[in-house]
Image (tube, grey):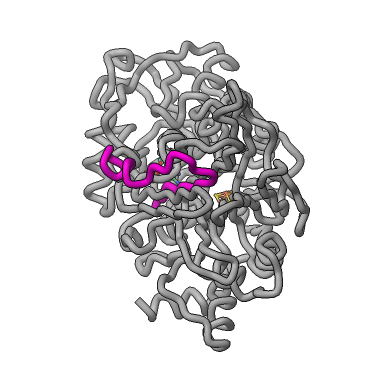
Amino acid sequence: MIFDPTTDKPQDECGVFGLYSTTPNDLAWLTYLGLFALQHRGQEAAGMCVSDGDKFHVDKDLGLVTQVFDERRLDGLRLPNARVSIGHVRYSTTGSNLRFNAQPLTTRTNKGILGLAHNGNFVNAREVRSGMLMEGALFQTTNDSEVMLNLIARESHMDLVEATASAMKELKGGYACVLMSRTQLLGFRDPHGVRPLVIGQRDSANGEGGAWVLASEPCALYAVGARLIRDVQPGELVWFDRDGLHSLMVEPKRPTPCSFEWIYFARSDGELDGVDIHESRLRMGAQLAREKPIEADIVVPVPDSGIGAAIGYARESGIPFDYGLYKNPYAGRTFIAPTQEARELKVKMKLSPTSAVRGRRVVLVDDSIVRGTTSRQIVNLLREAGATEVHFRVSSPPITHPCFYGIDTAARKELVASTHSVEEIRELIGADTLAFISERGLREAIGGSGLCGACFTGEYPAGTPLLNDVDKLALEV
Ligand code: AMP
Ligand code: SF4
């Protein structure tokens, strides 16, 4: 976990991937493919470890998967008879994109060399870390993974599975991790299942190429030719070895997976915890149309994040869906730009209106309003292009609280809905009308048994960091 000194919250939005090969294989290439499919979960750093039971190779750096792993570096990771690999893509904002915080993190322990990659945050990592420092433990990074690895190493009398289960019991928060030794692959999800993790299997052809796969999302399974077997359950630890898949329910609690995975974060070509991402977005849009109808000529999505909800809104309302905003496919996500000015310029680099909006009353659909910057600019773009009315519809409720479980929605003071009413936000972004889906409507649209919605409600199912921890961090940097 890394605290950005300029904000009041930890930031660790990531994608994880792991392979356990049932027959020796070139896993560096497969891991590369898996990470490439997870690129949307993190664009600032990428890394992987590969082992053949003897050698243990690690490489990681700042940059996109294709930038970090050029042919030369991939070659350096190639082991013809590899058995186990893990990989990681990391998303962070300014201040925390330090190279030493790239993952996987590796360390030598009494259980041999271990590699760990995690997505999410341990909310009590600092307390656990302070306790361990008092006992004489050494830390090289400010990274959560290192706390986890130290906890595992500390249990010298336990085997790797037992020690990992014990560490899971100590660390609180929302997390999903992959862990490897030279011969084993492990995966585990926090007790509430806030962060996702899925299991896949790759069939062997002529006795070759078979593998178990772990990934943050199913798209990474499909990318390596595997099929989805199931989600890792909240509080479950799974591991793979020569005998196949093993499971231990360590600490399952009431499941509350992150609703933002369905709203925005996860790729639309998959499902998590049995709920199809694209279909849930269609339902959010339809719900929004029922809750917040308006007379208009066309429904326009903010690409790509608003597409699913806009289709749902258009179908339900009967207002035609149209291609009102062109998205430059070479532009990255605007959120990563470090300053407000950079973010504003990046919106123009990324989006420009088409003639579809000229002389039309537009329903503009996006998945969320965070700081309000993008929204204001897009409304402006549409007006400049001749839209006569712009009605903004949002397929998530107002975001009023920061996330402590790994989604970078911004610090509380930057969240426009934490300091402004809906009417004030409408005025700020310059829309004719503005409406958000209700929290209940969102829950119904996603379905499932329970959801985390703490960024809308302030009720954190998996705990929060101690406030004085946040202060101490700000002092430390
Ligand atoms: P804003 O200008 O801050 O209101 O940005 C809102 C836009 O950011 C929406 O189009 C969202 O799709 C996108 N967004 C929402 N949450 C995130 C996130 N955690 N990371 C990156 N982009 C996001
Ligand atoms: Fe997801 Fe919001 Fe909960 Fe964070 S606080 S895990 S973004 S629902």
Determine whether 170 is above or below 81 in the image: below
**Residue 172 placement (x, y as % from top left):** 64, 65
In-image side of 164 versus 428 (left or right)? right
**Residue 114 placement (x, y as % from top left):** 52, 61
Q: What residue lies at 25% left-to-right and 43% top-to-bottom?
A: 344
Chain part drawn in magenta: 69-91
Residues 358 and 341: in front is 341
In-image side of 237 versus 366 (left or right)? right
Q: What residue lies at 25% left-to-right and 22% top-to-bottom?
A: 385
**Residue 196 placement (x, y as % from top left):** 61, 44
Residues 72 and 323: in front is 72
Residue 150, image quadrant: bottom right
Residue 391 seen in the figure: yes
In-image side of 97 versus 56 (left or right)? left
Asked if residue 305 is among those painted magenta in the image, a careful observer would answer no
Residue 434 seen in the figure: no
